[in-house]
Amino acid sequence: MRHKDDAKRKAISNAAIELITTIGFADTSMSKIAKAANVSPATIYVYFENKEDLLNQLYLMVKEENARAMLIGYDDSLPVKDGLKLIWENGCRHMLTQPTNFSFSEQFLNSPLINRVNRAQSGEYFQAVSQLFERGKKEGIFKDIPQSLFSAIFYAPSMMLGKQHHNGQLVLDEELQQATFELIWDALTI
Amino acid sequence: MRHKDDAKRKAISNAAIELITTIGFADTSMSKIAKAANVSPATIYVYFENKEDLLNQLYLMVKEENARAMLIGYDDSLPVKDGLKLIWENGCRHMLTQPTNFSFSEQFLNSPLINRVNRAQSGEYFQAVSQLFERGKKEGIFKDIPQSLFSAIFYAPSMMLGKQHHNGQLVLDEELQQATFELIWDALTI
Amino acid sequence: MRHKDDAKRKAISNAAIELITTIGFADTSMSKIAKAANVSPATIYVYFENKEDLLNQLYLMVKEENARAMLIGYDDSLPVKDGLKLIWENGCRHMLTQPTNFSFSEQFLNSPLINRVNRAQSGEYFQAVSQLFERGKKEGIFKDIPQSLFSAIFYAPSMMLGKQHHNGQLVLDEELQQATFELIWDALTI
Amino acid sequence: MRHKDDAKRKAISNAAIELITTIGFADTSMSKIAKAANVSPATIYVYFENKEDLLNQLYLMVKEENARAMLIGYDDSLPVKDGLKLIWENGCRHMLTQPTNFSFSEQFLNSPLINRVNRAQSGEYFQAVSQLFERGKKEGIFKDIPQSLFSAIFYAPSMMLGKQHHNGQLVLDEELQQATFELIWDALTI
DNA sequence: TATGAATGAGCTTTCATTCAT
DNA sequence: CATGAATGAAAGCTCATTCAT
């Protein structure tokens, strides 16, 4: 009996994500994924139950990866502004260096597919940001707003800029990143 | 060339948008659209060249509609803050009352399909916002930032909240809308 | 718009029955049927909902045909023995001249597929035989047995012989037919 | 060659027969058989050459079992009628108590698969019935008919009734069995 | 204009079988 | 002996599109 080959699973996942971001969900077929991953179509079904299962697992995988990347170097003891900036910069960096992951999750997030998976944030990551926000409120730094609004201001603008960066509509360089963070900070703080 | 039956064209468009937002691009076929619009598959090809043309025209149609909705009641002579708020509130209302249009353009915008159409903003609308932004800068109200950053702050957070509203993750009521606009205003202004 | 072509429907049906009797249910695929009928695989789905629907309709079609053949020349006013013999000989002739129909229904009848269609006998035919049997009982010709037993004796042996005839295990000629009918008559009558 | 684990061979055979009678030849795959038998698909190929070999061996196995069951308690020295009745009742009992075997061989017998195996009757059993028939003829009990006709009358009706019994169309109870045998006896004897 | 019929190409998935352990 | 991994081929079916009316 052969062992299940993690490299093969990874090859399939990567091929799938690559294809989806390049040609879109609608045109990404199992055969194309198989061809791109250099396996037989039937082999995909050794690692994934069916197409939906494959897509869902890809999404969860990418979400975890994103969450992990955001917390690199983060520490509860950091001052609020430093902590927030670190996470925000981690996010920017990840977004810019992993365009495929970014594009995939954007596409998935905005498709009806998302309704069939657990939409919840990755646990550890979610807790860290949540605690940071609460701490900032308690220290009188942040305005008294619900967390959903905090998140919308914190994430959405940079993601929009990131998309435009990848489209070639602008360059999200260090300077623009700093300027963006400053605006966000001004929005959130008293 | 003008086609006789504009109602039929509209039926096809609506059926397509409805299906795409409900079951997604990948599962929306020409036959399903035809069935939902109560026409023959062949009839779609009387009004649209092919599937890609249909999707592109849908996107342009929706974009125009959105742009028109944003400018309702707008007037160049309004004070900067009043004008900006009017547009912003128009956007919120449209987003909340036209969830199908909203979901469709989000899905389209985040898919590779977008790369094959003109990404440019609708003319009249774009000019209005652009001029408002420049006026605000000249009057010393807005910070000295590029328009792309202005747009990201202005649009992205409310769109994120709108998505969550439609998902049932939160309720974007009058109060939350006001709070959001205040944060955005704080971010943009000196 | 083209008309639905009854010749095409017939071609598909014939090809399917021919294949099933030749290579069996398990090896008869939609593509093979299509190829044998000289149509595209997709065309089959214009005339039949899916494979199961095709098979069921084939069975009903064949059953009707068989029933019709059994009653050729039959008349209520015939004496019991003459009527019974006429039907029986009709059955033999049909069985021997339409081996494909015969083999198909035997195969279908003995497969689990039969459980998903209406097993009931074809109306007109069933009534005729039923009435004949009752008349024979009333006239004191037939033994007092349930109709199921009457049917088993009446049909089963000749069908078994028919099968062997088609297999080449024997020749079901006029003489053997007569001998068989005499045995059946002896079994049924007082 | 003798394989170690005859239980495993039996498990595979039983699973296969069970599946075939339940869902039919066409839908019975090697993987499904493997799953039902709690072995790996590859294991089936340790015991059987391939799918066709498996099916053929199953048929031979079932045929032997049937033949053995028919002769239980049979003895050459029994009077003709007693001997015939014993065999006939053995057959009925076996048919009613082993519906799976019965349904499997009916299905196999009526499919083109049968053409690829030896159709001949099981040796010992065939001889016994053959001799009984000849003895009956010599003793002036049976009509002067070919053995094929004798067999058709002897087996076919009860098998038809057995099928209907398993379908729930009737109940083949002791009484109906007796009545059936009497008709058969009347048919065969002078 | 409008349509259902027709189709080759392609879809997702399972097939029977072999491989490597 | 026994197995899960692996696979090319084929399954049933739907696709976007064109044809004939």
Image (tube, coloured by chain):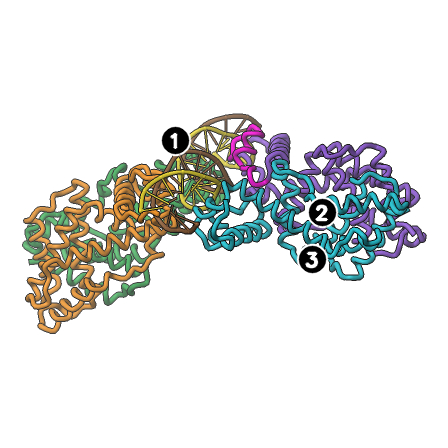
Chain colours: A orange, B green, C purple, D cyan, E yellow, F brown
Label 2 – label 3 distance at C-alpha: 20 Å
Q: Which mark is residue B1?
A: 1
Residue segment shown in magenta:
C25-41
Residue at horizontal 76 percent and vertical 35 percent from the top:
C94
Q: Residue F9 lies in what quarter of the image?
A: top left
On the picture, is C64 further left or further right than B41? right
Point out the frontmost of discs 3 and 1.
3
Type of the residue with mark 2: Tyr
Label 1 – label 2 distance at C-alpha: 85 Å
Residue at horizontal 66 percent and vertical 43 percent from the top:
D109
Type of the residue with mark 3: Leu
Q: Residue B115 lies in what quarter of the image?
A: top left
Q: Residue C56 lies in what quarter of the image?
A: top right
Tell me whether circle 2 and circle 3 mark residues in contact (CB < 8 Å).
no
- Whether C34 is among the magenta residues is yes
Q: Which mark is residue D96?
A: 3
Q: Which residue is mark 2?
A: D125
Relative to residue A182, is residue C79 depicted above or below?
Answer: above
Q: In the structure shown, which secondary structural element does the residue marked by tag 3 occupy?
A: helix
Residue at horizontal 45 percent and vertical 36 percent from the top:
B4
Chain letter for the residue marked with disc 3 in the picture: D
Within-10-Å neighbours for mark 1: few <14, some 14–19, many 20+: few
